[in-house]
Amino acid sequence: MGAMEGYTDADFRRTILGAIRLLGVVVAAGAPVIWWRAGWRSAALLVVGAAISGSGLYEWLRLMTAVMARMDGGEAARPMGLILTGFFVRLGGTVVVLYVSLRYLNGSVWALAAGLALGVCALTFEGLRLVRAWTV
């Protein structure tokens, strides 16, 4: 567990931002393929799912940064009420975007599910890269 002791806030930030960047690259490469195979509506659902997933990763970064700033106590932390309000507003917006996209795009639900799952896959990949860096 010696490597875990050296895990800093900067490592967390770098991991989350790397996952968001990887998510963007995979969607940029995958959306044209989905468009070609299943139509523009399915490609749009893939992009919507990935955008929701990426915004969730970014919101998690903001939330954890605020919590860590509060725990450290060294810097002036933003009010948690503002951060939590933003979190719940994004969550409500996500429900609206999911409903509208499923109601009006009429594409493949599997493309939407793939877009939503890409965030978890990208974060897992970045986590494995971090573990590999610790063990080498």
Image (cartoon, helix red, strand yellow):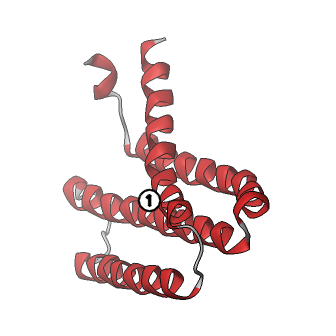
Q: Is residue 94 above or below residue 62?
A: below
Residue identified by numbered label 1: 57
Q: Which of these two is toward me, 103 or 73?
A: 103
Q: Is residue 46 left or right of residue 121?
A: right
Figure quadrant of the N terminus = top left
Q: Which of these two is toward me, 77 or 21?
A: 21
Residue 11: image location, x then y, percent: 44, 40
The residue lying furthest to the top in this view is: 136
Q: Identify the element where label 1 is drawn.
A: helix
Q: Is residue 87 left or right of residue 34?
A: left
Count of marks, rendered view? 1
Q: Is residue 106 above or below residue 113?
A: below
Q: Is residue 17 left or right of residue 131?
A: right
Q: Quadrant of residue 107?
A: bottom right
Q: Residue at image x 73%, y 72%?
A: 40
Residue 121: image location, x then y, percent: 48, 44
Residue 15 visible in the picture: no
Q: Residue at image x 41%, y 44%?
A: 12
Residue 100: image location, x then y, percent: 49, 88
- Badge 1, how many Cα within 10 Å: few under 14, some, many 20+? some
Q: Is residue 32 left or right of residue 71?
A: right
Q: Quadrant of residue 70?
A: bottom left
Q: Residue at image x 56%, y 46%?
A: 18
Q: Residue at image x 38%, y 46%?
A: 9
Residue 45: image location, x then y, percent: 59, 71
Q: Quadrant of residue 94?
A: bottom left
Task: Give, as a three-letter code, the residue at label 1.
Answer: Leu
Q: Is residue 54 above or below residue 18?
A: below
Residue 9 visible in the picture: yes
